[in-house]
Image (tube, coloured by chain):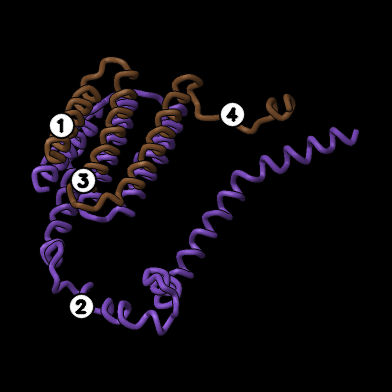
Chain colours: A brown, B purple
Amino acid sequence: MFGAVAAALLVAMGMAIIRALKGPTVFDRILSVNTFGTKTVLLIAVIGFLQKRPDFLDIALVYALINFITTIAVLKFFEFSHLGTPIGEEEAEDL
Amino acid sequence: MNIIDVVLLAMMVITALAVVRMRNLFAAVMLLGIFSLLSASLYALLDAVDVAFTEAAVGAGISTVLMLGTLALTGEREKKPHRPAWLPLVVVVVTGAALLYGTFDMPLYGDPNDPIHKHVADRYIERSGQEVGTPNIVTSVLASYRGFDTLGEVTVIFTAGVGVLALLGRGALSRRRRLNKEDDR
């Protein structure tokens, strides 16, 4: 049962890689990395059950959080083309 | 288990080759994120969950963000090289072959006769309760048996924190001082 789930997850990971390789626009690639991260989280959880040690589950949860942060950073990069406001003179005046 | 290993390793090879061939640097950064997620799952399969966790946090998280910050400063496309770089290829192949040769001396994965299982582990398991007095063996190893090692690690982390504060904290501090001056006026 879990073996079938793991196989399905691996197939899904392969398809995400294909999309990241081909992806004509950047958003295809961002989405594929995000999907891939989710599949990794699920795969680790399933591996935990396959090895009869479901205590991997909380680690899979932390992975999900990291994946979220990365996606937000990438999207922010695209929205503003840099990652944050630099500490410069103008900002100090605004405050 | 073996099939999952093989599939994950094959995906890693495909991703790595694609990163090398790719001229669009943004796509290369995204593929490197996938690569490090793949290696994190392999570490999890090898039961090294903490290493896998570090790989996911540093490889897929922090380095992606740092590389994107660099891309914002430089540009998204890599220039075509004028001629193939043979010398670096030879150096990399020779180094890789030497490293592979080095792995032949390593004990087999999960071998009960490994030095790591023969050395001091038994003593830690049997005596740490009386000698150190903490219920957790890992804690007693980290804090007592390998205390000097832990002291060194903490020193490194402290130095890194001081360095980051010296680099980033100064701007915020001077800004706050300037604002306070303006308030006084």
Q: Residue furthest top?
A: A24
Q: Residue furthest front?
A: A1
The residue under label 2 is B118
Q: Are marks 4 and 1 in contact (CB under 8 Å)?
A: no
Quadrant of residue B95 within the rendered picture: bottom left
Distance (Cα) linking label 4 and label 1: 42 Å
Q: Position of residue A29 (x, y in %)?
A: 30, 23
Other-residue count near label 4 (Cα within 10 Å), few / some / many at <14 / 14–19 / ≥20: few
- Which comes before the other along the chain, label 3 or label 4? 3
Look at the image and tell me in which quarter the N terminus of chain A lies: top left
Distance (Cα) linking label 2 and label 4: 54 Å
Quadrant of residue B56 within the rendered picture: top left
The residue under label 1 is A8
Q: Position of residue A20 (x, y in %)?
A: 25, 25
The reply, left or right, for residue B92 in relation to residue B67 is left
Other-residue count near label 3 (Cα within 10 Å), few / some / many at <14 / 14–19 / ≥20: many
The residue under label 4 is A85
The reply, left or right, for residue A14 in relation to residue B138 is left
Q: Secondary structure at mark 3?
A: helix
Q: Amino acid at mark 4?
A: Thr
Residue at x 42% of width, y 41% of height: B62
The subunit carrying tag 2 is: B
- Whether residue B78 is visible, yes or no, is no
Report the mark closest to the observer, 3 or 4.
3
Q: Secondary structure at mark 2?
A: helix
Callouts 3 and 4 in the same chain: yes
Residue B162 or residue B138, whichever sits in front:
B138
Residue at x 13% of width, y 74% of height: B113
Q: Amino acid at mark 1?
A: Ala
Q: Position of residue B9 (x, y in %)?
A: 15, 42
Q: Amino acid at mark 3?
A: Ile
